[in-house]
Image (cartoon, rainbow, N blue to C red):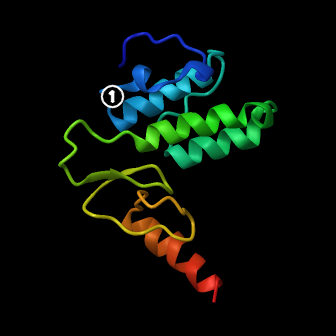
Amino acid sequence: MLEEIHCDFKDFSKEVIKGKTYEERKEIFWRCYASNPKKEDLTNLSLTDMINYIKETDEFYNEDKKYVDACIALIRELKPENSNSMHHICCICGETFVGYGNNPWPLSKNETDRCCDDCNMKEVIPARLNRL
């Protein structure tokens, strides 16, 4: 369990999640976003599922979208402390994977993004075939 962190998700920053694991980053984001203790704990979900839940259930999502997107980008962009490691975060599902990964184009046009083998097979390749 992480120490008590009290922040508004609009204050979510690299400093808040520096040195934290991917799972800890997700938990911090959810604590910041769901400051209402009555909200369901979604930290066991993948990052993608968590975001889909927020989109479907939060009446203020459209107003907060730029902040949510910025938080998600921070969670995904921060690499583990050992930058020589081959651990990456999938830009599609948000899960950690080991190895080089795959080019997620056309689902992501960011040159540094990588996706896991599962998302490559289930999401990227079909998206490429649909473009033919």
Is 130 rendered above or below residue 48? Answer: below
Position of residue 45 in the picture relative to residue 127 (left or right) = left
What is the three-letter code of the residue carrying label 1? Answer: Lys
Q: Nearer the viewer, residue 75 or 39?
A: 75
Is 26 rendered above or below residue 91? Answer: above
Graded by Cα atoms within 10 Å as few (under 14), some (14 to 19) or many (20 or more), the crowding at tag 1 reads: some
**Which residue is painted at 62% across and 22% down in the image?**
10
Is 72 rendered above or below residue 90? Answer: above
**Which residue is painted at 33% across and 28% down in the image?**
20
Q: Position of residue 99 (x, y in %)?
A: 25, 61
Q: Position of residue 81 (x, y in %)?
A: 23, 36
State the SS at label 1.
loop
Is 131 rendered above or below residue 12? Answer: below
Residue lying at the far front of the rendered structure: 111
Quadrant assignment, res 32: top right
**Which residue is painted at 79% across and 31% down in the image?**
63
Residue lying at the far bottom of the rendered structure: 132
Residue that mark 1 sits on: 20
**Which residue is painted at 38% across and 39% down in the image?**
78
Quadrant assignment, res 54: top right
Q: In what quadrant of the picture does the C terminus appear?
A: bottom right
Position of residue 125 in the picture relative to residue 116 (left or right) = right
Q: In what quadrant of the picture does the N terminus appear?
A: top left
